Amino acid sequence: MEHSIFKKAKLAAAIALVSSTTLMTGCLFEGDEAKSVTTAEVGNNSEHVQTPVGTVMGTVVDTNGNPVKGAKIYVGGRAVTTGAGGNYELRNVPVSNLTVTDKGNFVGGDIRLTIVPPAGFLGAIVTVEPTAVIDNGRSDQGTTDETNTGSTNYFIDGFTAVAGDAVLPAIGTGGATVTGVLRDADTEAPIANQTINLELQDVNGSPHTNGGGNAISYTSVSYPATTDANGAFSIAGVPNDSDLNFIVGGYAVTGVDANNFGATGVTTDDEVETVHVGNVYASVITNADDARPYVTSIEEVATNGSRAKLHDDTTNVLTVHFSEQLQAAMIDANSVIVRDLDAGAYLNVTTAVAADARSMTLTADSNFVAGNRLDIYLLKVDFRDTSSNLLDEDSNVAANDISYDFDNVNGNSDYVKLQVEVYRELNINAAVVTNLTQLTTDDSPLRLANDLDNASSAFADVDMALALNGVQQLNSADDDDSASGIDTKERLANLVVALDKAGIVDASSIIQLNEDGTPDTSNLGLNSNFFVDVARVSFTPSNASTYRYWIQRNGAAVTTNIDIDEQSSPDAKTTNTASNFTTIANNQGYGTIEPATGSEYADFVATDIAFLISAVQPGDMLYIQSMDDFGNEGSTTSIALADNVPVTTGLQDSYGEQDLTSTSTVFGEQYGNGGELANPDAQSLIGTPLLNINAGMLADQDIYTDATPSLDDLYESNETNTTTGDFYIDPALEIYDATAYVAWSADMSRTIAVSFTEDLAWVAPLAADSSKPAVGSEPVDTASAALTNWTIMNDITIASDTDVVNADLAAFSVNNIFTLGNTDGQTAKVIDFSDLVADSAGNVSTAAANAKVVINDALPPVMTRAVYTGNALTLTFNEPVKVSTDTAIPVVTLGGVNIFLDEDTIAAHNALAAASRTTLTIPFTTDNADDMLPLNRAALFGLAQYDEPDVSLAGATVGFHGSLSFVNVQDDFGNTWANDAANLTAPTFAAFDNLGAMQITAQPVATAIANGVNTITLTYTFSHAIDLDAMLGNAFGTNQTALNAADVLTIMTYTGAATVDNGAATNGTLSNNGKTLTVTVAMSAGTFATTETLGFSAAVPSLWDSVDAVAVPVLTVQ
């Protein structure tokens, strides 16, 4: 839009605006003078100035700022010449075609000044943008005087345009000389006989636009030279103080060594007459065809993509277009290969190249199959343009590229592959799926076997892909108690932990990889996480496009999602999460199974689809509904999810024997060595739960809960007489005697049970009572003890174990618990429930379920008799026993005193045959003296005295009993009361003192020494071994048995006049049992005389009782 310039009425305002400028541009009018013309504009109180005029002035200088005299300045048809100061001035220069900008500035055409310099300088053209002086403001703006009257603007003629300094560089003889060598940029070889030019870019000191907004350009002058044979050149007369670029015909300059301007030029300086640039590098400019041809399209493609979709009219012909003309003669029968991926076959096609050789048709023998995927392979070497460039995958312009061509064909780069898919009509027939099945185990191709597979089918795992995430299955929760946790899950998980502790399985979650990256399954473990709420389901797809699924429990939606098994079903995916599941209505509340991203429909329907469902229960309903391509519902099928895992024997708690930190709960490896107990036929039992027969089963069996179970019925059977004054052992002391054991062990029948992982039932129950098996359907056992009265008891409250609230049991009666434990338990006898029991869902425990238990001896030995005879403590047990080889552990404790055995005695006992090891003899002889202590018999045997009918029962009509603890004595399985009491208080035995007080049983008669005899031999026999060491002053355990004359005179006293022979004639000897002492006294001068005496100096002490001694009568010579 064109605007006018206004002349304002107020003179004061015009004078005030002399110092302000508005940018005006325009065109000069020809002629010596110009006049301004004004026109009044109605409604705006203004006058329009058509042609303002003014003065243009400036200065011409050289690059050092010196004025240039004699330069002619031309404007239009007028000219002026600069004087000595280089100045010039042009008056009455007109400007026209002024335009007001949106910011209120006035702009128009430029004023061009042509400068023709004197010789030796470069000419120039200066463009001036004149500034007119105007007043476009109002003094009354913003006041109440501002009315509807339009604004009036004044324009003042007589503007001044200052052109500034025009800087002219010196040339010719006053210019610079540039020298250098022109070289090939690739080889650095000199380029000979080549024209090289310089082109002015800038004059230093005179930017193209100076501070006044005026522009300057210089006269175009050529500065050529020709290189010599060595590529050297010299260019004279080049503008000084300037920047110039090198120009080489047919070459592109790429670099300059020195004094360079940018990468391809030179900077001159009037202070340097010759500027040497060193090497100038240039590359030959070629015009060869380097562009490779590529496929621009397939005419029949309707939708672009990584696999393009063909349109619905495609039959058996495809037309491939190329980016340029090809060499048609190169394209022959082997140039194109077409593969139908879904048919699994190569197609026979013929090729025809168009007349312009820019397209090619491919014709198959028959129409393409709808929905099938085609891969078209083009041999690159046969598809060449006219410059012999081979076919490429893409162009260098992304907009020209297609998405369905690929350069790498299974590692082969000789072909370009085009991927298309034949059009398929949308499916409107969504048929019902088939083979909707719940699977018992993971049948995926990459299923990883683990050690649990061989342990029991109860460890069926429906998710054994690469991730080891524990055992997942759909099993009965059997959660009948009020405690936290699911019973079946906990029982099976505990069994896994036990198998791991026993070394049967490796319950780690680490997968070792082979060198090729595949998992090493040779020693694969499984972590002990256990889930019983996961089902694995598969179905055979129909012709549906997708499938809906939903799960209901008792008619209500189950908000859980499925997890597609990517190993067995890599071409399927699910798109929903649990939040999508609500009541099925209005096309909501369901999940979707559809082709996986990047998978083809043909692959999606080619194989069964397998998936996992978590957080479900037996009885939940799974629905699968087929959907067509329009999203409309087809047929629906369903399946009731079921418990498909059999019941098996679980860990047997056995009064605390279920110790998940030890290996005492499942059967281990085969064992045995020469001269040892062996278990040669055990391989099939490895990992089977142990039925530990332990001390807890010896307690009184009643319906009452004992805070600390004890053997009350054993203690209450101690010897008791009704005669007033007879003593007996109080049962509250928990001590029993031999009489008690005989009475108690007469009935060792018990009712015990085998624990299972969930509720169970007999496959063939008794008609009258389903808790019992039919005749001939009882569990099979190899035990020597009689097992009868089998009864199933589900959800039984356990009173003896506060950790478990209920159990599922198969109970039985055994006629002798000792036989079951000590005999059957030491030879791994088995109770087998295979094919005889089933869970509540009817899953029969076949042999694969390993529903067995191995009877295991966990009973510590029970003492039946203990007799102290002075020289030994003889202990009798109900089974062979051994002594710990750790000599720091006391063998027994008698009356509070620990009694030990030395290594040799322990080794001798443990080496005995089993039949001989039911008796353990602790000798109080010289062989065991190092480990003996002086015994205070009266203190040790402090229990009450009472009558017993026979010494074989460890009693006598007189005597005392002592409390004997045998907690460290172990049987052949290492069971001890110290470690295997099974919540019982270990019993203490009443050992019988069959020694009695020390007495002299034989001694010399009173007339044994006759008058006049010079040598006498005396023999003394005691009921105890005597402590000769104490009599001689030796340390306890010195065990001196031979006496010399001095020893004899130490222990005996002679009163008489004769002289005792201090030589060998006087001596003494103690018998091997320590009870008989023989002493010979000889006189070296004189003989025994009447009334003289010979006897022991003090009472003779007992070796077997530290506080007992006997006074022996002194003999008088007769």
Image (spheres, grey):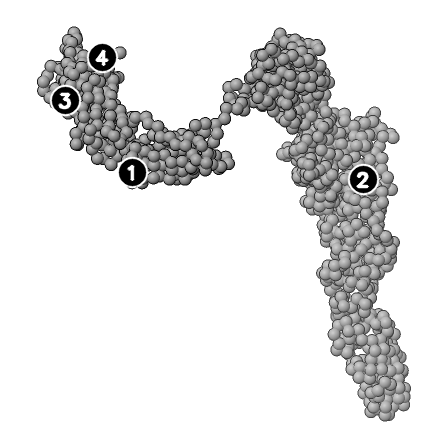
**Secondary structure at numbered mark 4:** loop
Element class at badge 1: loop
Please tell me whether mark 1 or mark 2 is closer to you in this view.
1
Residue linked to disc 2:
685
Can you identify the residue that label 1 sits on? 270
Of residues 29 and 963, the one nearer the viewer is: 29
The secondary structure type at the circle numbered 2 is helix
Image coords of residue 1062 (percent x, y): 82, 87
The mark found on residue 17 in the picture is: 3
Residue 668 image position (x, y, % from top left):
77, 43
Q: Identify which residue is drawn at 82% across, 66% down.
A: 871
Cβ–Cβ under 8 Å for marks 3 and 4: no
Q: Which mark is first along the chain, 3 or 1?
A: 3
The Cα–Cα distance between marks 1 and 4, rounded to whole angstroms, is: 50 Å
Task: Report the residue marked by disc 4.
Answer: 3
Front of the two marks 4 and 2: 4
Residue 1010 locus on image (x, y percent): 90, 86
Residue at the image position 34 percent from the left and 36 percent from the top: 177
**The residue under label 3 is which amino acid type?**
Leu
Whether residue 949 is situated above or below residue 23 in the rendered picture: below
Q: Quadrant of residue 543?
A: top right
Evaluate whether residue 629 shows in this view: no
Q: Amino acid at mark 4?
A: His
Q: Secondary structure at mark 3?
A: loop
Q: Nearer the viewer, mark 1 or mark 3?
A: 1
Q: Nearer the viewer, mark 3 or mark 2?
A: 3
Q: Is residue 1012 visible?
A: yes
Mark 4: few/some/many CA within 10 Å (<14, 14-19, 20+): few
Q: Earlier in the sequence, mark 3 or mark 2?
A: 3
Pick the front one: 133 or 284: 284
Measured along the vertical axis of the image, is residue 965 above or below residue 1028? above
Is the residue marked by circle 3 packed among few (<14), some (14-19), or many (20+) residues within 10 Å?
some
